[in-house]
């Protein structure tokens, strides 16, 4: 049996949810191009597509909206937990802990679409409640007139968001909702395969998402661009980083060996936004230079811009604080996780790969 570190060549499941063609740079959700969905549909419609396998009719859309509305408010004990966690507990840990505390009798195996809606509805409320608490502000009750994405911005800032911001964040959430068998989705499916309930599966996925190689990159992209600061400093900074063997955040992808289609779509979104021009201009400049230098230092590795690079630009443009970048990614990826958990349960077999023992053997066995 051969070892495949990182499981790159292992196909661990059949799925109807999403398809990635890494060479062509194509991402499909249940038969639709994710790029097209991001332009034409809102968050709720694409949630419906991922969970139910079709674009909703008007009645189905309305019924989904009603279920979202019913589930947006936090149970009292979860609000208490959020308020009492020490200030130094980071937001991803707050999400993980809050979701984990939901594990009551309403969230039992087998996973259901209602459970998926409930968890998805709650994540923005968890983030906003904690964010406001840390800033000495009272939580904002969700606004029944607003959709999911607008409500997120509303609960964070306490005022109705600008349409352009909602549109940009909507595109971001649709493009980042689902992405094949990535690390956090795999974690969710492994946990679900034990017939543990959806809350445990999603809690595990949040833990996987927290790592900088997965969901932490946009924050680090912002830090990288802030450190670079100017076009003149870009080349020496990038060279220095590559020569010391470090990675450039927002570049490279396990699957895409060409432009990440989500990065392209988000770059397009930034063109229609009023943003800090200097920063966006620098981002465009650094992108081109980084691709050139990556080819020089890592020839043939096909390292291009990934979704996180332009995610950083869009999230900055909608005035999202950088510490909320990964949590916001989580608020959208929870849709894909829950869809995958449901699919896993429909045709379940517990995951049980093997490992090759390379440690010491007892002497009597070595001597034989
Ligand atoms: N900057 C510099 N070099 C990079 C790089 C980057 N961003 N991404 C990959 N490489 C190099 C690796 O060092 C490796 O070089 P080697 O062949 O000399 O050892 C080679 O390219 C292959 O990379 P590897 O780490 O094996 O690819 P992977 O498929 O295991 O990892 C990522 C994919 C995303 C984890 C990796 O590209 C990365 O760490 N990127 C930066 C973090 C990031 O943007 N994450 C968000 C992902 S959406």
Image (cartoon, grey):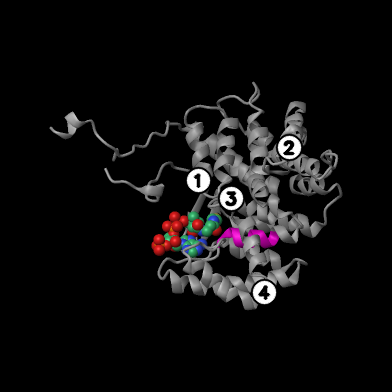
- Say if mark 3 contacts mark 2, CB within 8 Å: no
| Residue 215 circle label | 3
Q: For the residues marked 4 and 3, what is the alpha-carbon distance in whole angstroms? A: 26 Å
Q: Marks 3 and 2: which is nearer the front?
A: 3
Q: Secondary structure at mark 2?
A: helix
The quadrant of the image that shows the C terminus is: top left
Task: State the residue in front, 62 or 199.
Answer: 199
**Of marks 1 and 4, which one's residue comes earlier in the chain?**
1
Q: Label 1: how many residues lie within 10 Å, few (<14), some (14-19) or many (20+)? A: some
Q: Which residue is tagged 2?
A: 68
The quadrant of the image that shows the N terminus is: top left
Residue 348: percent from left, percent from top? 45, 31
| Residue 183 circle label | 1
Q: Secondary structure at mark 4?
A: loop
- Quadrant of residue 364 within the rendered picture: top left
**Of marks 1 and 3, which one's residue comes earlier in the chain?**
1
Q: Residue at x 43, y 41 (%)?
A: 13
Q: Residue at x 66, y 46 (%)?
A: 327
Q: Label 4: how many residues lie within 10 Å, few (<14), some (14-19) or many (20+)? A: some
Under 8 Å from ligand 1: the CB of mark 3?
yes
Which region is colored magenta? 306-314
Residue 215: percent from left, percent from top? 58, 50
* The residue positioned farthest toward the top in the image shown: 105
Residue 318: percent from left, percent from top? 76, 58
Q: Residue at x 76, y 43 (%)?
A: 128
Q: Marks 4 and 3: which is nearer the front?
A: 4
Q: Label 3: how many residues lie within 10 Å, few (<14), some (14-19) or many (20+)? A: many
Whether residue 327 is visible here, answered yes or no, is yes
**Of marks 4 and 2, which one's residue comes earlier in the chain?**
2
Q: Label 2: how many residues lie within 10 Å, few (<14), some (14-19) or many (20+)? A: many
Q: Which residue is tagged 4?
A: 230
Task: State the residue in front, 361 or 312.
Answer: 361
């Amino acid at each position: 049996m051969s070892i495949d570190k990182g499981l790159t060549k292992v196909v661990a499941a059949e799925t109807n949810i999403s398809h990635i063609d890494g060479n062509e740079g194509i991402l499909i959700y249940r038969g639709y191009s994710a790029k097209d969905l991001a332009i034409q549909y809102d968050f709720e419609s694409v949630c419906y597509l991922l969970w139910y396998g079709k674009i909703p009719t008007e009645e189905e859309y309305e019924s989904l909206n009603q279920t979202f509305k019913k589930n947006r408010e936090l149970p009292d004990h979860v609000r208490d937990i959020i308020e009492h966690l020490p200030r130094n507990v980071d937001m991803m840990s707050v999400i993980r802990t809050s979701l984990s505390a939901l594990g009551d009798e309403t969230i039992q195996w087998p996973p259901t679409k209602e459970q998926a809606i409930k968890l998805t509805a709650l994540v923005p409320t968890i983030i906003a409640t904690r964010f406001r608490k840390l800033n000495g502000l009272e939580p904002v009750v969700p606004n029944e007139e607003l959709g999911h994405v607008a409500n997120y911005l509303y609960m964070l800032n306490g005022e109705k968001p600008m349409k352009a911001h909602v549109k940009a964040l909507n595109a971001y959430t649709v493009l980042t909702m689902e992405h094949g068998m990535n690390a956090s989705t795999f974690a969710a499916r492994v946990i679900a395969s034990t017939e543990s309930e959806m809350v445990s599966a999603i809690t595990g996925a949040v833990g996987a998402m927290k790592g900088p190689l997965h969901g932490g990159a946009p924050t680090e992209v912002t830090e990288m661009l802030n450190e670079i600061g100017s076009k003149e400093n870009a080349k020496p900074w990038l060279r220095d980083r590559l020569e010391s063997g470090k990675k450039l955040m927002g570049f490279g992808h396990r699957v895409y060996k060409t432009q990440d289609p989500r990065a392209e779509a988000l770059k397009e979104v930034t063109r229609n936004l009023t943003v800090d021009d200097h920063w966006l201009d620098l981002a465009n400049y650094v992108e081109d230079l980084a691709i050139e230098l990556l080819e020089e230092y890592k020839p043939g590795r096909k390292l291009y811009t990934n979704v996180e690079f332009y995610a950083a630009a869009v999230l900055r443009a909608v005035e999202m604080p950088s510490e909320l970048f990964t949590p916001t990614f989580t608020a959208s990826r929870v849709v894909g996780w829950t869809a995958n958990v449901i699919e896993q349960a429909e045709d379940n077999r517990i995951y049980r790969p093997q490992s090759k023992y390379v440690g010491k053997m007892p002497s009597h066995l070595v001597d034989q």
